[in-house]
Amino acid sequence: MIPELGHFALILALVLAGAQTFFGIFGAARGDARWQAVVRPAVAGQFVLVSTAIGALVHAFVTFDFSVLYVASNSNSALPTFYRVAALWGAHEGSLLLWAWILAVWTLAVAIASRNLPASFASRVMGVLGFVSFGFLLFTVATSNPFERIIPAPADGRDLNPVLQDPALAIHPPLLYMGYVGLSVAFAFACAAMLEGKLDQVWARWTRPWTTMAWAFLGVGIALGSWWAYYELGWGGYWFWDPVENASFMPWLVATALIHSLAATEKRGVFKSWTLLLAILAFSLSLLGTFLVRSGVLTSVHSFAADPTRGLFILAFLIIVIGGALSLYAWRAPQLRSPAGFEGTAREAFLLYNNIFLVVAAAMVLIGTLAPLIADAVGAAPLSVGAPYFDKLFPMLMLPLGALVAIGIHAAWKRGQLGNNRARILIGLGVALLAGLVLVYGVYGVGKPLTPIGMVLGIWIILSSLFDPVDRLRRRLTLPRAIIGMTLAHIGLGVGLVAISTVESYSVERDAAIAPGETLALGRYAYRFDSIKEIEGPNYDGVRAVVTVLRDGAPVATLHPEQRNYWVQRSTLTEAGIASRWNLDMFVALSKNVGGGRWSVRAQLRPLLDWVWLSAALMALGAVFAVTDRRYRVRASASEPAGETTSEPKMAQGSAAAEAT
Amino acid sequence: MMRHLRAVLLAVLSALLLSVSLPSMAFDIEAMPTPAEQKRYDALIHELRCMQCQNQSIADSPVGLAEDLRRDVREQIIAGKTDAEIRDSMVKRYGNVILFRPPFEASTAWVWLAPFLLLILGVFVAVRIVRKRASMVAGDDSVVDTDESAR
Amino acid sequence: MSRFLIPAAIFLALAGVLYVAVVHSPNKSTMQSALLGKTVPAFSLPVLGNPGMNLTNTQLAGRPWVLNVWGTWCAACRDEHPVLLDIAKQNVLPLVGLDWKDEDDAALEWLKQLGNPYSVVAVDRDGRTAINFGVYGAPETFFIDADGRVQYRHVGAMTAEVWQREFLSRLPRGVLP
């Protein structure tokens, strides 16, 4: 009964999405206030309906309703409650419903926050979002109904994929989807501007916080997935350039370029068409990611079960949405001109250079990911592209970017005036060189050739980021949150560069077979295999080992690697034993029982690995500061229609109007 | 086909678990005779694709085929073959698809060249834009607020 | 205008590639063997049930033959077995089995229980021969012509349709019954 209710709610939501699209776009086009008045109620209604649907599915999971096919395929009576809820997004149909729900959430947020935006613009934004929602709901209802029944209901379910029975991985899809879907807001703002035929600095100011938040969520989602892969997949890697990983990384790279392009558009009114293109591109890559994961065209450890019909549907949707946006772009872009000028060393110029590298990097990842498909499509022999390709090309693009960031931070708008900051630039570089050389030749030892470059650039970026805020504090000037945010995010980038350079060069790994009592040596460290015993969990059994890590003979950590056999799906998973110190991770994973009491294990030392995730956290934190900047929390500037009450994006403060720059 | 591959994978995995108690299964954790050979072995097995798996290298895959291929690499290294010869032997039997690093040949060079061409195009576009904008500075009298100049 | 044309062109090319990819994706299993047109790899393997006897590729030269890679651990091999029995009844081509990474006892038992479609079964205990054939899963079936060249490789369970379309069609004229 309840599943049918959920199904019905979805169909109704689909209808409302259609209404939202129609009245939003055409209501604005006709200037019809009554038509436009339908839009916000439609958004609210859609939110309620999709929430009902997702609630119905959660209910089916929590109550072990195995008569619902999706629940039977992804759950089991032995599954703990937390994972019963997380199982919702464990496979294709449910994750699609999650996508639709998160879109409803973002749209509702936009509806609420846009009450003081010009009516026709807001209607258009919500109309475009309605179109995206319509597409996803249609896809769900037509091909991927999560409420399908299975008669007769099986006695028990097939269990959630054990790989997903983990807290980090349970939360990873929702966060990732918050990012993917959030980019649709930027896309909607871009389309609305094109439909209006107007794109100015005020538009950029509205669009920035949404885009920044989506970027932050996406970054955190990616980092969480990477962290999970590290401790769960058992081999100690944190990034594999797997097609599905790439599918999330490409939009992130482009979104990074977009938030910087928006900054220039807001500040100086330049790069209008580039900003539009980037917004279209970012969301396109989001949709492309959805396509790649669900259509079966790429083999990946992450992909959902393949189905070409679904693939064609998503592809058609992709073509309509992107084709439509590009057509709008062709129509409007020629009209977007700005009179602003800037020098070759100006901030705008550096942003442009950086964006070139970011977009080319995203394109490189796309080429590598799609190369097997392209080869097949043109009838060439099958081709594989994996980590060796990306590991070679990505640093080649990122290192120049790093240097540009370190210098560009000091550039002023319009005239650059790098000469004024020559001291800062050179001091930063000098200290970074010194610190880098000490780390490479003193602390860690000679590693790969690019390592010193990465280290120095990372440190240089951190130092460059600190000059301005420290100077402001010293001179008792204001330190707006936007600047704190920018500083944190750039420091995060620097930290990430240092971390990746270090971990790629100085990790130590050994595979060996050891028995209890034996010790495995890794440099100054030793892994002593103390004991191993059998264990049982709610839906698995297995073994758990105790491994003591010694440094120069003294114990510094105890690790507990496990190997679990999940009963229902009959698969075996390794849980690595990891001890994290501020500058090092000690890692061990059980591979297999080779008999005679011996186990083959993989032991690793990973210096600074946690700083990779720290860098993601810093970037996200920076984003939070940036979007809570005062200029989003005060009354709208004079360029907007007067006499409207304030209800700006993040917090309603209603303070007296300060001139928002 | 996916179902079939999965069935095969599951079957092979279960076979592996069954046969795990045989001491001979420990061969792939025996070290290579010399550290230099160990380095070559480690590098090569990360470059070769496990043909039965979903996008894993033979280094990271537990399936029987991956073990066989690792053994093959090991034996070829000990027999004195060069890295290029080993890769060639793999390509001869499985095609270019077994290499995770696409070779730089006539039919595959585009994968390596395309990003560089795009970069060159990007730099060219950037230079053009900057030239145009730089020439507009004189006529642009808009004032930039220096107090908030970092935003 | 070029600002629009370049993204549009890229977009259309990409859409084309993705469309082809989706349409092709169910057929990905028919990955072309890298050995097509090349001479069959040399091998010398013990014969199942006949210790002391060896099967070599030279013994099979001079006429077309079929190699079927299988194992008792392989579920799909069990699925295709009836088709192989039918094929054997037709008696047009020698069907050589390659028992891949298997146990002799289990293999003999399997053939006794399910029937034996093979003219002869070679035992590849450690898998070295299979990887020389570029095998990456079972079952796989190869067509080798009279000159000893691999002409076709089918991945997955054999079906009557594939047999007709890809194997019988490659027989020289006049051999079909």
Image (tube, coloured by chain):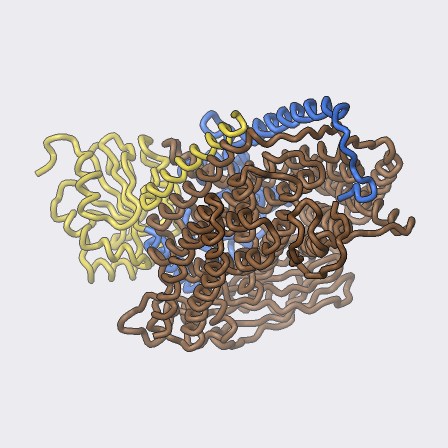
Chain colours: A brown, B blue, C yellow
From the viewer's side, name the closer residue of A526 and A226: A226
Quadrant of the snapshot with the C terminus of chain C: top left
Residue C124 appears in the rendering? no
Q: Is residue B104 above or below residue A485?
A: above
Q: Is residue A122 above or below residue A167?
A: above
Q: Looking at the picture, how far across and down is residue A288, in whole percent?
A: 47, 45
Q: Is residue C117 above or below residue A449?
A: below
Residue A116 appears in the rendering? yes
Q: Looking at the picture, how far across and down is residue C14, in whole percent?
A: 44, 36
From the viewer's side, name the closer residue of B9 and A489: A489
Q: Looking at the picture, how far across and down is residue A15, in whole percent?
A: 38, 58
Quadrant in the picture for residue B6:
bottom left
Residue visible at 74% across and 48% down in the picture: A660
**Residue at the right extreme of this rendering:** A475
From the viewer's side, name the closer residue of A100 and B115: A100
Residue visible at 58% across and 46% down in the picture: B42
Q: In the shown orientation, is residue A95 left or right of residue A622?
A: left
Residue visible at 25% across and 57% down in the picture: C78
